[in-house]
Amino acid sequence: MTTRRPYVILSAAMSVDGYLDDASPERLRLSNAADFDRVDQVRAESDAILIGATTMRKDNPRLLVNSEERRAQRVAAGKSAYPLKVTVTRTGDLSADLNFWHHGGEKLVVTVDDAVEKVRATLDGLADVVSVGPELDWGLVLDELGRRGVGQLMVEGGGTIHTQLMAADLADEVHLAIAPLLVGQPEAARFLGPADYPGGSTARMKVLEIRAIDDVVFVRYSPKERTA
């Protein structure tokens, strides 16, 4: 019997020129209050939220469903108040002091064989820790989440993870909030980096939705529905 992999949504706010942040120490606020509320709704609808270890170290997010009403609706539907929070690390370089571990519900770390004991020792029970083998294979990561009952996975970065999932054709939807800002700093993080993307540079993704949310433009794409 094969495990059903989660429906994967890549979610990001970016500048018009494709950056997730600028190069300053402070986090660049790209989105607005109304769009943050939209993100909160997608989180509430998801079974798990995933961020990379680099994003966790840089931004130190709590990664919660902030609306009390939405949490109550999840509980009424027989779910936990918060989605499972997931991070992925090859190196195992994580700190037990990060906000991620101390807010919300259950947490999971997916890592590789060489780092699994290091992560378990560092976190000391703050999260479930599992290895997918000697290398970090995204197909195996999704298989592991499928076995844990994750039907919808929301991926909130960073750019390396978005790039890897897009290149492997594992993203079912892309949610982009495009802010009316220009960053222009080559050292800053971008939504996607260089990769051998499915279909090459002429493959056009299907647009599912476009709408203005105050001064942000929200676009939903279906990457797997590409046309030449």
Image: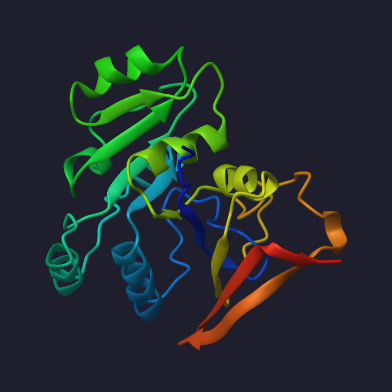
Which quarter of the picture shows residue 43? bottom left
Residue 129 image position (x, y, % from top left): 31, 26
Q: Is residue 137 left or right of residue 77?
A: right
Q: Is residue 160 left or right of residue 82?
A: right
Q: For this rendering, which residue is in front, 17 or 1?
A: 1
Residue at x 40% of width, y 30% of height: 110
Question: Where 124 falls versus 211 (above or below)?
Answer: above
Q: Is residue 1 left or right of residue 139?
A: left
Question: Where 108 falls versus 124 (above or below)?
Answer: below
Residue at x 55% of width, y 68% of height: 176
Is residue 181 something one can see in this rendering? no
Tell me the quadrant of the picture where the C terminus can be found.
bottom right
Q: For this rendering, which residue is in front, 26 or 68?
A: 68
Residue at x 43% of width, y 25% of height: 111
Q: How is the image coloured?
A: rainbow
Which quarter of the picture shows residue 178? bottom right
Question: Where 161 falls versus 71 (above or below)?
Answer: above
Question: Where 92 falls versus 74 (above or below)?
Answer: above
Q: Is residue 115 left or right of residue 10?
A: left
Q: Number of callouts in the render?
A: 0
Is residue 189 something one can see in this rendering? yes
Residue 144 image position (x, y, % from top left): 42, 35
Residue 148 image position (x, y, % from top left): 33, 40
Residue at x 77% of width, y 51% of height: 198
